[in-house]
Image (cartoon, coloured by chain):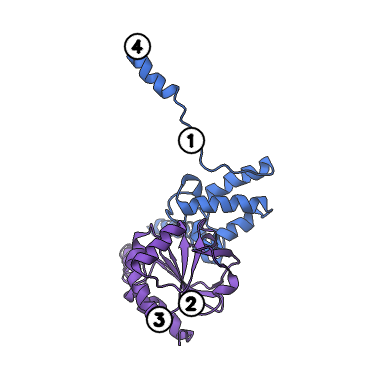
Amino acid sequence: MKKIILLSFIFLSFIGFTSEVYTFNSEVDEQRFYKLIHEVRCPKCTSGSIASSNAPVSEDLKNKIAELINNGYSDKDIKQYAKDRFGSGVLYDPEVNTSTYILWFGPFIFLAIIFIGFVFRRRLG
Amino acid sequence: MNTLLRFSILIIPIVGILFFYNLLTEDKFYPGANFKNFNVPNFKLQSLDSASSFKKEDLQNELLLNVWASWCITCRIEHDFLMKLNSEGVRVTGLNYKDESIDAINWLNSYGNPYNFNLHDLKGSLALDMGVTGAPETFLIKDGVVLVHYSGEVNQAIWDSVFIPIIQENKMFK
């Protein structure tokens, strides 16, 4: 009986949790929002997305992204907005451009060098 | 070919160690400093006492924009240095960040006011637009363009090595 009473404290309590509520014009916009906040890194904590962070700057950035979506900005524009302010490190997926070629293709080049070396070694041996 | 392969086992780690040694012991390595130039964004904010309102055009001249708050402990430590800069003729403008105006005014009254005026950014909207992640942060502005964005406490050492070269280069605060 005691257990049931104690459990009822948990199940019948009126505790709810909602963080900020965001409103959008359409469901598509809402899905874009949730996708974007998982792709933008928290500038304060750097090892989590803004979706997983409740740091003040992450909350502000989420509000800003919601605002920009409602103002008709594209995903690309929004990522650019975050990048301009917090650096390219704020995007989880590094963009493919001349400064990140080594990052994207370096491992494959390294692998190719190892493979070529391996073949040479066998031929010589 | 074989000897080259054998040597590479030695060379590759040595190159790696030298690379990181060089990177991590660099004298001019200031993680908080960002020298990317950008224009002061549009904004409309009130002063701490809500008596006057400010916009982009008020942040045009040579000035130091310091992001601070009464809840920010590092700002308290930085405060003495800002007082010194102000007494030396550097224009320091405050961007009060996510703070109640009454707390901020009390803070200035009890510790002293190094700012020529203060923008009250309760929601952090201008701060977000300028890439602020917390307090304290400091911007060096000339002709409406941000020349230096420093995240963290500004002290004599940081001032001398991060700000002074840019200030001299642009002939500011003369």
| Residue behind mark 3 | B164
Which mark is on residue B63?
2
| 3 and 4 marks in contact (CB < 8 Å) | no
Q: Do the residues marked 2 and 1 share a common chain? A: no
Distance between the Cα atoms at labels 3 and 2?
A: 13 Å
- Residue under pointer 1: A17
Chain A is which colour? blue
Q: Nearer the viewer, residue B144 or B13?
A: B144
Rendering coords of residue A88 (x, y %): 51, 61
Q: Between tags 3 and 1, which lies in front?
A: 1
Quarter holding residue B67: bottom left
First in sequence: mark 3 vs mark 2: 2
Chain letter for the purple part: B
Residue at 59 percent across and 74 percent down: it is B57
Q: Secondary structure at mark 3?
A: helix
Q: Nearer the viewer, residue B160 or B76?
A: B76
Q: Amino acid under label 2? A: Leu
- Callout 1 environment at 10 Å: few (<14), some (14 to 19), or many (20+)? few
Q: Position of residue B87 (x, y in %)?
A: 37, 80
Q: Nearer the viewer, residue B65 or A76?
A: B65
Q: Same chain for marks 3 and 1?
A: no
